[in-house]
Amino acid sequence: MNTLTSWSQIPEFSDEKTECLFWQKNELDPRLMQSCIHEPDARESTTITLRFDPRMLSRIKRIARSRYLNYQSMMKQWLAERLEEEVHRQDNSPHS
């Protein structure tokens, strides 16, 4: 197994089969993986204000409680997921 120590050693793949074959013979150095883990800093967060219909907010809080989550964290997760969907959709649209 070949251990990759730099991101530049990873080629562009033409398809999933080619990528699969590559990863069967190669692996990332754990130090390389560790170097890419982003640890959020509280200073990177911006506070905003959103106005919600009280019934909608109540429903959101109820869903969060049923999942043992903080409702604000759950909402951030929802927004992050939707943002990824939108970016993916935009990247795959014929007009991009």
Image (cartoon, rainbow, N blue to C red):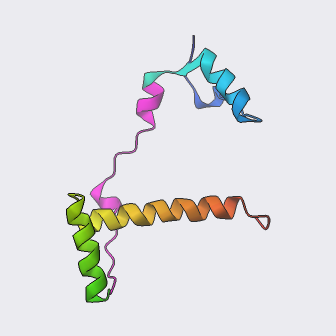
User: Is-magenta flag for residue 46?
Assistant: yes
Image location of residue 48, percent across then percent down: 33, 77
Q: Is residue 36 above or below residue 82?
A: above
Q: Quadrant of the rendered structure where residue 72 is?
A: bottom left
Q: Nearer the viewer, residue 74 or 48?
A: 74
Residue 80: give x, y in percent of width and height. Answer: 44, 61
User: Relative to residue 20, is residue 28 drawn left or right?
Assistant: left
Q: Quadrant of the C terminus?
A: bottom right
| Residue 41 shown left or right of residue 13 in the figure | left
Does 60 appear above or below 41? below
Image height of 19 relative to 84, above or below: above
Report the quarter where the N terminus lies.
top right
User: In the image, 19: left or right of 38?
Assistant: right
Q: Residue at x 67, y 64 (%)?
A: 90
Magenta-colored span: 31-51
Q: Is residue 28 left or right of residue 19?
A: left
Query: In this orientation, which residue lies closer to the viewer: 84 or 38?
Result: 84
Q: Is residue 56 visible?
A: yes
Name the spot of residue 3 as percent of width and height, x first.
Answer: 55, 16
